[in-house]
Structures are given as C-alpha cells and as structure tokens.
Image (cartoon, helix red, strand yellow):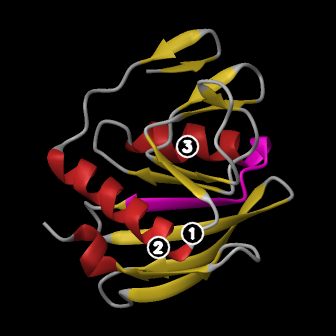
Amino acid sequence: AEWVDGEVVVSPRPSAIHGAIVMRMGAALMAALPDLKVLAEAGVRLPRNRLRGPDVMVVRSLPDSTWVEEPPVLVVEVLSPSTRAEDTFRKAPEYAEAGVGQLWIVDPEHRRIDVSVNRGGVWEPLLHLDDANPRGEVAVSDLGVVRLDLAAILAP
C-alpha cells in the first residue's frame, strides 16, 4: 500500500513473473553498482506527504527509519496491468519532483525497458530497449554503468 493525497492506494499482489523481473533488475543493479544499496519493495517519502513503494530503488546509504527520506539515485517500476497507469502517469512526475535521479520503467507486456534521467524535474530519455534493440548500457551519474539485456531481464 502507498499513501497519496490523504488516501491509501492499495495494489494487488504482483505476479510471480513480476517478482522474477524485480529480482533480475535488482541483481543487475547490485552487480553494476556495488558501492550503493539496492532495495526491493522498500518505501520512499516524497514531497507533499506522499509515500510510495517502487519495485526497486537504489540509494547511497540505508535509511535509519522505515522510509527512505533522501531522493533515490534511481527507481525501477515493473509495469503490471493493474498498476500501469499509476506507475507511469502518477508516480513518474512525483519521482521527478522529489529529485529521483533516474526512472527505469520495465514493461513486460510490450517487451521494453525505458530509462530516463531527471533534468530539472523533467524526465529525459536515456535508453530504450525492445526486441529490435535488446541490449544497452546506462551510466548512473558517475557511480557506475549498468549493462542491460532485455531477454535476460524478461526471461520466463
């Protein structure tokens, strides 16, 4: 559950495939960014008293409290049919406003990964992977480079 504008936003439990993709993304991030902390299913406090729970987030250090208070280096949202609109239309601008450095959207249904960087509160595309262009790499600021393989991330 998340807290947005005074309301609790409840989402159904994700599918097993969703969970596997989250784990693969987390493993890729941990391998490429060993000096950072990769968290799955943790919560982050955003402006205007909002509490969100991205599927994966990368932070510089573990929080002292339940919620991450500092803007994450990056967040990953793995889209599900039931949360697609919430993840893309509501959460994305909230993450930008909060100062999250990068937003990674993994879309298993359409077989794509889109990575954007926050430039002054606006998301700018960095990388787009799909079946025609399945491999690429993303520089995460000056903290490291993550190499991605769409087929490996989305494997059944």
Q: In the image, what residue type sits under mark 2?
A: Ala
* Magenta highlight on residue 97: yes
The tag earlier along the polypeptide, 3 or 2, is: 2
Q: Secondary structure at mark 1?
A: loop
* Magenta highlight on residue 131: no
How many C-alpha atoms fall within 10 Å of the one at disc 3: few (<14), some, or many (≥20)? few
Determine the residue located farthest toward the right in the rendered image.
120
| Numbered circle sitting on residue 89 | 3
Q: In the image, what residue type sits under mark 1?
A: Pro
The tag earlier along the polypeptide, 3 or 1, is: 1
Report the number of numbered marks: 3
**Place of residue 110 in the rendered image (x, y in percent of width and height, measured from the top left):** 29, 66
Q: Is residue 140 left or right of residue 23?
A: right
Quadrant assignment for the N terminus: top left
Q: Secondary structure at mark 3?
A: helix
**Place of residue 14 in the rendered image (x, y in percent of width and height, measured from the top left):** 25, 38
| Whether residue 14 is situated above or below residue 155 in the rendered picture | above
Residue linked to disc 1:
34
Measuring 53% from the left and 85% from the top, which residue is drawn there?
A: 137
